């Protein structure tokens, strides 16, 4: 099976997650077509038979280019088995209501695009303090303080659970082939 792994990223964590999704697909003997949605490139030539899209939450929304892609491709996405990996920080919160909020990030995208992914996985992202500019580092550190996330800006902090992600890909492939 050829599976499109389409992603958008701002700081690189979702690219890493999409890479891990592609590796998990290939490890099971299928073919992954890794595609940076913001590249403006062409993916249709390889005729994927399923899709897993990955996007990060920034200021409570997904990147505009990602939402645009989903809107444009919704009818194709609905015609094949498809899944969504939503990447956020809130999903790792110790507070249930914040995790609940993170679970609802995809709602607006789904209702405005008409895409109906069969499965959704919520992956925790990363804080890349060493790569933020001064203002972003300050804002994110304040946000981290409020959310009880690490505030040590001298290093990056990664929260992605790679084994959960790999299990999700396995479950999706099993369902897609059933
Ligand atoms: C400017 C900025 C805004 C963010 N806003 C949110 C947010 O509203 N909710 C959330 O759960 N995570 C938020 N995050 C955390 C990101 O989802 C997390 O850092 C993720 O790993 C980013 O993925 P990327 O590296 O692929 O861009 C924000 C991060 C940044 C840098």
Image (tube, grey):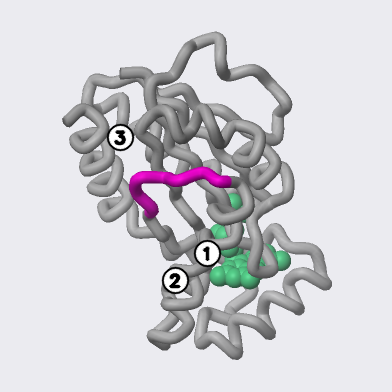
Residue that badge 1 annotates: 88
| Label ID, residue 91 | 2
For disc 1, the neighbor class at 10 Å (few under 14, some 14 to 19, many from 20) is many
Front tag of 3 and 2? 2
Quarter of the image containing the C terminus? top left
For the residues bearing labels 1 and 2, Cβ distance under 8 angstroms: yes
Say which of 60 and 154 sits in front: 60
Q: Magenta stretch mostly in which secondary structure?
A: loop
- Is the residue at mark 2 in contact range of ligand 1, meaning its CB lies under 8 Å from it? yes
Dot 3: element: helix
| Label ID, residue 58 | none
Dot 1: element: strand
Residue 29 visible somewhere in the drawing? yes
Which segment did they paint magenta?
114-120
Q: Position of residue 45 (x, y in %)?
A: 55, 9
In the displayed structure, 74 sits above or below 9; it is above
Residue that badge 3 annotates: 24
- Is the residue at mark 1 in contact range of ligand 1, meaning its CB lies under 8 Å from it? yes
> Which residue is at a point 44% across and 63% down the rendered structure image?
124
For the residues bearing labels 3 and 2, Cβ distance under 8 angstroms: no
Direction right: furthest residue: 135
Position of residue 140 in the picture relative to residue 89 (left or right): right
Spatial separation of the CA atoms under disc 3 and disc 1: 21 Å
Position of residue 98 in the picture relative to residue 38 (left or right): left
Q: Position of residue 162 (x, y in %)?
A: 33, 52
- Is the residue at mark 3 in contact range of ligand 1, meaning its CB lies under 8 Å from it? no
Q: Is residue 119 magenta?
A: yes
Q: Quadrant of residue 131?
A: bottom right
Spatial separation of the CA atoms under disc 3 and disc 2: 22 Å
């Amino acid at each position: 099976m050829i599976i499109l792994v389409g992603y958008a990223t701002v700081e690189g964590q979702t690219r890493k997650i999409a890479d891990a999704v592609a590796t998990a697909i290939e490890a099971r003997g299928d073919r992954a077509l890794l595609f940076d949605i913001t590249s403006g490139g062409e993916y249709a030539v390889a005729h994927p038979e399923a899709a897993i899209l990955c996007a990060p939450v920034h200021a409570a929304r997904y990147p505009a280019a990602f939402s645009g892609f989903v809107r444009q491709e919704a009818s194709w996405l609905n015609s094949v088995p498809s899944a969504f990996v939503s990447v956020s920080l809130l999903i790792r919160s110790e507070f249930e209501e914040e995790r609940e909020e993170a679970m609802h990030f995809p709602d607006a995208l789904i209702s405005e695009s008409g895409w109906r992914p069969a499965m959704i996985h919520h992956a925790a992202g990363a804080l890349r303090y060493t790569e933020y500019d001064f203002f972003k580092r300050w804002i994110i550190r304040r946000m981290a303080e409020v959310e009880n996330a690490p505030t040590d800006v001298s290093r990056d902090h990664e929260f992605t659970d790679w084994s959960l992600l790999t299990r999700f890909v396995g479950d999706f492939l099993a369902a897609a082939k059933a």
